[in-house]
Amino acid sequence: MAQDQATVSGPDLAQGVALAELADGGKLVGHVGDEQVLLVHRGTEVFAVGADCTHYHGPLGDGLVVDDTVRCPWHHACFSLRTGEALHAPALDPVACWSVEQRDGTIFVREKRERTATIPHGKTPGKAPEGIVRGRIVPARIVIVGGGAAGFAAAERLRRERYQGSIVILSNDDAGPIDRPNLSKDYLAGNAPEDWVPLRPDSFYSDNGIELRLNANVTSIDVRSREVVVANASNVPYDRLLLATGAEPVRLSIPGADQPHVHTLRTLTDCRAIIERAKTARRAVVLGASFIGLEVAAALRTRGIEVHVVAPEKTPMERILGPQMGDFVRALHAEHGVAFHLENMASAIDGQRVTLKDGSTLEADLVVVGVGVRPRTELAERAGLAVDRGVVVNGYLETSAPAILAAGDIARWPDPHSGESIRVEHWVVAERQGQTAALNMLGHRETFAAVPFFWSQHYDIPINYVGHAEKWDELVIDGDIAGKDCLLRFKRSGRVVAAASIFRDLESLQAEVAMERDATL
């Protein structure tokens, strides 16, 4: 992304910098013209790539170089230093690359390299027959059920891999694939315009030969004939099928939960409805102290609304982050005016009055329910696929039925890091699984081995979490949680299984790499 001349910093790399100033493994941010460029020295090679992550423009100069890649410190996207390719979600777009010349002990950054289009020029996707390419069977027709993170990432990766067959996305949503984390963060808070929310403009799908069908209600899968049955439409045949149906919010069964001012947050339509209600609301009650619930609380406080959080636990997010971080999160929200009603639950909503289990009441003209989600496994169950608290898949994300894969919130996979079968409801995990599923639908045999990662934003405080720790027997705290400078290591049997951090971005990346390599911190 080009920057104004006044904002560029560092040396002019076109004029050259001394190789001696850049140690092996070192990084240097400078500029070429009006663009910021990251210079990386690796062995005998020097690479020059765009200095900003293409996801949320995180500073790659503050990131981590691993072999011939660089990782973003904010949300752990990964880019190839050789090609600029976005290797790991959440980034989908590449960073720019420049040619580098070494002469007389000086490094000169030369011309920017041109990139080729995703789809080869002169070829039309959707016309290729099923066949064998380099020993791999390549399907002619791929169908994706679900228009969320996993489904979109799979379709995008298929075209990036120059797949020329048919791609159909069947989504029961009324909007195209969106950046869902934004719904509970900046967009809901009013700090981001709605045009930030779509993952791609509408033209992306037609330009790349992806048939996106919205409001498509898939009722069943005919495994024997390899067809997807869609309500009020003809069946859709497939050679490979990806189930990426995601999760849906748990809805309350208490009296009054169906009133118009009571909302859940999952879709863009949900978020628009909350924003519209927030324009006139004075007092809001958030039911649930999950990450989503507390992010909603922060967003509503940013809008100047009085917020009360009701949750059954004693300490918010203690099960995931431990008591010390949970206490910090509670105190942070309290500092911003959020009132907590913990070890309590809503028993009824009567008009604009929320009655709690202890008999107390709260006035609210807006109620947001954030008490968790459940995986949407009904299609898989009706199709006879193996289901166990999610759709069971192997290391290649293949289900128990031939030619059907699953990814995202519904998939329960064998995690090589914990040695357990896990299901994770994280945005980045869903995207990365969609990308791996795309490769495997094209005949590759790539094991899904990414370390789970998510981030949460509370006002101006980000919390990064890598790994997966459903349980731990030791919690090691490095730094000062209250001082907003810490890294927490969650250990089981002496081995680090997860790490949470605040403003320890580089160490969070190092923890991720260590887990990938099964190293012990």
Image (cartoon, helix red, strand yellow):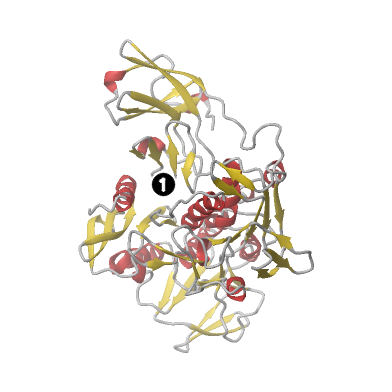
Instruction: Pick whichever, 411 or 214, lies toward us.
Output: 411
Q: Residue at x 35, y 69 (%)?
A: 470
Q: Residues within 10 Å of mark 1 (few under 14, many from 20)?
A: many
- Location of residue 504 with respect to 235 vertically, above or below: above
Q: Three-letter amino acid code at disc 1?
A: Trp
Location of the N terminus by quadrant is top right
Q: Is residue 394 left or right of residue 489?
A: right
Instruction: Pick whichever, 328 or 363, lies toward us.
Output: 328
Q: Residue at x 47, y 87 (%)?
A: 357
- Location of residue 333 with respect to 351 vertically, above or below: above
Instruction: Pick whichever, 220 or 188, lies toward us.
Output: 220
Quarter location, residue 24: top left
Which residue is labeled 1 in the image? 74
Residue 454 in picture, x, y percent from top left: 42, 56
Residue 368 in picture, x, y percent from top left: 56, 71
Residue at the left extreme, as displayed: 494
Quarter location, residue 64: top left
Residue 504 in picture, x, y percent from top left: 31, 49
Residue 379 in picture, x, y percent from top left: 62, 71
Residue at the bottom extreme, as displayed: 359
| Secondary element type, mark 1 | loop
